[in-house]
């Protein structure tokens, strides 16, 4: 076993957030690096607590008020300074970074790209505000984008061509839209549900469908949102709505076509033969449920936040010269920075989730946490996910996400295998690598077997009662792991251990795929589909049981503009291409040869997908570019 300098210093810089452990959500970075950062956090929490409870005299209250204002001003000032000094080498060195560990902040190139995007966004918003109606605002917004070399949402041209969200487009978006993660084949276990719908005949493009027979032929597919099923009126923002619809699709010669939509379990069923406004309302409620689930769970929860634990544990437990560190760490570039930024623009009070989605902020965070804890690590493997949903090619021949993702998955799996087998010649080599096992234990062991020193610790000289009031000090840890069922859950395998080379290859493949291709698939389609609000409103503004036109359901003009802004900002930068030499940074000749083989395979994948996209354009009038290797960033950084 090679000798490495243990990452002791990194363990001090990277600590896990202790707040919210009882919510069982994704592991998060404590955003105050180093002991001075922990002290600053603790004092600020104490200041706020004593002020809110009115436990101080008026002079001290004034002093605390000024201290908190100064702290908030300082945070805002450093954000501005970070942009202004982005090209300054000393700033980039980390000396002026107050929250993230050294080297985790954005670099000058990325900041410049983000500044350019912000300028385009500002101009587009100003133009949109001159529009008297939401339709005018959208036209003005898109005109600015096109004048600046950007594109309008792909789906806007499809819907304007068809005059509405057509049934064919509604079905196509389940397999090639912003969220291809929800559709699944109807199984034998769902026979009762299928039969409950079979009380009336159904027709798809003139063809009468017998539901039980179609299910037996593996031609029925379901989209539903059980995570949203128990939401009550109190869980939603006033005047905004999202439901838990079930949509049933039939695999026809032309692709997936909708058979019915049931807005709520046990509720009324709508079909293409329903009144036009009723059918369109049913489709839009499904679209809103889909984008709500996508934004909270499939995008934010299952990529950004799910990968944060790995981005923290890797520098904490693996020396920088360790081969597994060198394989993984380039795919975490800027992940902690963008997630910390996401705390402000998505998850904070009055941030995007609270302003645009129907569930309240607290409920939204709860949905993320619940979904994360229920998802085993194995489900991040593409083959497992596709099989668990019953979406193999024999049952669904045309599935752009699956077909393109499988090519990229195979390329990544070949890359990780070739690289890791250079360093691990046997399963015993994996089992006896103390750094690998420490890394796996930090991620997969129950937390109550771990040390509280993995969380921030306030200085011992502070009064104990003050420390207790800041909620930073962890006294008792829960009995769940940071990553559910990591690396696998079985009777023959101890939690948080790695036992074979193949298992190590599988783990690395899942992590790299999620940080690259999976995030690209669920991120960069956002503006193309949700950037055109009539296709996919982030909230509906009429209750599901009230008859209304599609226009009545859509957000008001200002909310429409904010939805365009958000979806553009979330997908407006592609920084760092998958497999880029400079980002991977291999220096050893054998490693570089493995990387070159990976790059050659990605180029072959690129050509295959380009050919597929030409066929998709001819058939559907729209392509699926999100998994072209040239369009996949090397990490989650936007």
Image (tube, helix red, strand yellow):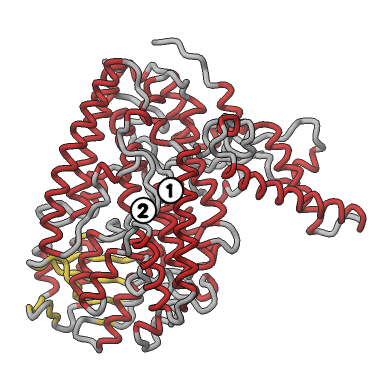
* Crowding at mark 2 (Cα within 10 Å: few <14, some 14-19, many 20+): many
Q: Tell me which corner region of the image, top left, top right, bottom left or bottom right, holds residue 252.
A: bottom left
* Crowding at mark 1 (Cα within 10 Å: few <14, some 14-19, many 20+): many
Q: In this view, does 166 lie above or below 175?
A: below
Q: Residue at x 37, y 67 (%)?
A: 142
Q: Name the residue under label 2.
A: 523
Q: Residue at x 33, y 77 (%)?
A: 263
Sequence-first disc among 1 and 2: 2
Question: Where's residue 287, x and y in %?
Answer: 33, 70
Residue 395 visible (yes or no) = no
Rendered-image quadrant of the N terminus: top left
Question: Where's residue 196, x and y in %?
Answer: 23, 76
Q: In this view, does 413 lie above or below 228?
A: above
Local SS, label 1: loop
Q: Which of 360 and 595 is in front in this view?
A: 595
Q: Residue at x 53, y 49 (%)?
A: 341
Residue 579 visible (yes or no) = yes
Q: State if disc 2 and disc 1 touch (CB < 8 Å).
A: yes
Q: Mark 1 points at which residue?
A: 638
């Amino acid at each position: 076993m090679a000798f490495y300098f243990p990452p002791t210093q990194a363990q001090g810089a990277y600590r896990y957030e202790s707040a919210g452990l009882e919510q069982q959500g994704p592991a998060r970075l404590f955003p105050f690096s180093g002991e001075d950062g922990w002290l600053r956090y603790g004092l600020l929490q104490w200041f706020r607590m004593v002020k809110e409870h009115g436990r101080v005299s008026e002079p001290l209250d004034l002093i605390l008020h000024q201290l908190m204002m100064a702290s908030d001003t300082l945070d805002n000032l450093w954000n501005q300074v970070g942009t202004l000094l982005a090209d300054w080498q000393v700033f980039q060195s980390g000396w002026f970074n107050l929250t993230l560990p050294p080297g985790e902040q954005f670099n000058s190139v990325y900041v410049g790209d983000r500044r350019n995007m912000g300028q385009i966004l500002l101009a587009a918003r100003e133009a949109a505000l001159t529009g008297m109606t939401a339709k005018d605002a959208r036209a003005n917004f898109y005109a600015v984008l096109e004048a600046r070399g950007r594109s309008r949402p792909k789906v806007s041209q499809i819907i304007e061509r068809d005059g509405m969200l057509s049934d064919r487009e509604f079905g196509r978006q389940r397999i090639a839209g912003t969220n291809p993660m929800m559709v699944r084949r109807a199984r034998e276990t769902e026979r009762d549900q299928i039969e409950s719908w079979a009380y009336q005949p159904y027709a798809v493009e003139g063809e009468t469908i017998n539901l039980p027979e179609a299910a037996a032929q593996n031609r029925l597919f379901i989209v539903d949102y059980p995570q949203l099923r128990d939401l009550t009126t109190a869980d939603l923002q006033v005047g905004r709505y999202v439901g838990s619809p079930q949509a049933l699709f039939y695999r026809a010669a032309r692709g997936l076509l909708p058979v019915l939509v049931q807005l709520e379990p046990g509720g009324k069923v709508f079909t293409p033969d329903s009144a036009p406004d009723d059918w369109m309302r049913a489709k839009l409620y499904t679209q809103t449920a889909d984008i709500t689930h996508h934004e909270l769970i499939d995008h934010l929860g299952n990529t950004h936040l799910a990968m944060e634990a790995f981005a923290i544990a890797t520098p904490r437990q693996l020396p920088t010269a360790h081969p597994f560190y060198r394989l993984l760490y380039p795919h975490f570039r800027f992940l902690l920075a963008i997630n910390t930024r996401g705390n402000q623009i998505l998850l904070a009070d009055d941030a995007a989730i609270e302003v645009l989605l129907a569930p309240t902020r607290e409920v939204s965070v709860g949905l993320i946490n619940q979904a994360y804890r229920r998802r085993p690590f194995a489900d991040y493997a593409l083959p497992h996910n596709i099989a668990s949903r019953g979406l193999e090619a024999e049952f669904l021949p045309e599935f752009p996400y699956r077909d393109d993702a499988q090519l990229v998955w195979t390329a990544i799996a070949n890359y990780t295998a070739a690289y890791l087998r250079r360093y691990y010649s046997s399963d015993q080599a994996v089992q006896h690598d103390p750094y690998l096992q420490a890394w796996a234990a930090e991620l997969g062991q129950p937390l109550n077997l771990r040390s509280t020193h993995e969380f921030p610790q306030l200085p011992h000289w502070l009064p104990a009662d003050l420390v207790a009031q800041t909620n930073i000090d962890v006294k008792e840890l829960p009995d769940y792991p940071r990553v559910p069922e990591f690396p696998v859950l079985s009777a023959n395998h101890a939690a948080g251990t790695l036992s074979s080379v193949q298992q190590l290859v599988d783990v690395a493949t899942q992590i790299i795929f999620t940080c690259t291709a999976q995030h690209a698939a669920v991120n960069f389609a956002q503006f193309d589909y949700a950037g055109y609000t009539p296709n996919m409103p982030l909230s509906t503004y009429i209750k599901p049981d009230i008859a209304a036109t599609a226009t009545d359901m859509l957000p008001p003009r200002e909310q429409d503009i904010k939805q365009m802004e958000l979806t553009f900002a979330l997908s407006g930068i592609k920084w760092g291409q998958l497999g880029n030499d400079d980002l991977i940074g291999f220096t050893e000749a054998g490693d570089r040869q493995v990387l070159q083989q990976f790059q050659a395979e990605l180029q072959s994948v690129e050509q295959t997908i380009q050919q597929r996209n030409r066929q998709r354009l001819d058939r559907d009038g729209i392509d699926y570019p999100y998994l072209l290797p040239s369009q996949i960033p090397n990490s989650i950084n936007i």
